[in-house]
Amino acid sequence: MTGANPVSWNSATEADRQRIEWLIEHMWGPERPNEPPTSAIWTILDGARHQRVYESVRYSGMERVCLYAGALPRELAEAAPYLVRLSRKTLYAREVLTEAWGNSWGIFFSTSAPLEKLRNHFRSFLRVRDEEGRRLVFRYYDPRVFREYLPTCTIAELNAVFGPVDKFFVEARDTDTVLDYTRVDDQLQTTTFRIGESAPRKSRLTVRTVRQNL
């Protein structure tokens, strides 16, 4: 397994904690105590990035499921991707964001879809075929892969990736920057935010009618 040793929430500086609280506010939006939430925030965490991921998910107490099917040997289970629902008020959400953000542990997204629908959706493109027809593992949940792949998608591919997802939140190369991805009229809208700032830095629309290779 790879990845830098992450900073924990307990050992985070006040500046780090303010960054995490900004991310929570950004993903969940303003609190509305008298209104039921219309969507939830989920993450796909990549167990292959760090040994902490598996234990974090295992003892999270949150709604979660492995994206790999069947009974897995321990070694594979520790390196598998996990779909986890996050709750705004919990310590776990803060722990995950503190450790994951900037270490390429996974991607985050908002949706109103239930667990099983999300699992079926994200399992559908765990494996892809290359130009020679070979089946390959597609680690799209690595933010470094996701942010390069998504802008190359055709309309059909874009709709397939989003499925029931309303918005993706992905760390940029500069990890003080958040990339928000949404669909607007069959186009990909990418909105860039600097952590700590309320107004976006920039927003752009892209659409592909044919596949553009990376």
Image (cartoon, rainbow, N blue to C red):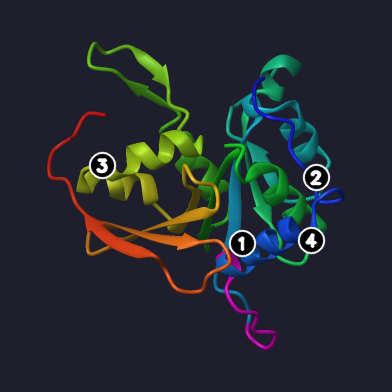
The span shown in magenta is 27-35
Which numbered disc flags the more N-terminal residue, 2 or 4? 2
Query: Given the image, on which type of amino acid does mark 1 rest?
Result: Leu
Asked if the residue at tag 4 contacts the one at tag 3, i.e. Cβ–Cβ closer than 8 Å, the answer is: no
In the image: residue 78, left or right of residue 30 = right
Q: Pick whichever, 40 or 123, lies toward us.
A: 40
Examine the rendering and report whether any part of residue 124 can be seen: no
Q: How far apart are marks 4 and 1 (CA)?
A: 14 Å
Crowding at label 2, few (<14), some or many (≥20) Cα neighbours within 10 Å? some
155 w.r.t. 76: above or below? below
* Quadrant of the drawing holding the N terminus: top right
Question: SS of the residue at dot 3?
Answer: loop
Q: Do the residues labelled 2 and 1 touch (CB within 8 Å)?
A: no
Residue furthest left as drawn: 209
Q: Which of marks 3 and 4 is nearer the N terminus?
A: 4
Give whichever of discs 4 and 1 has the lower sequence position. 4
Are discs 3 and 2 less than 8 Å apart at CB?
Answer: no
Nearer the N terminus, badge 2 or badge 1? 2
The answer to whether one can see residue 163 in this image is yes
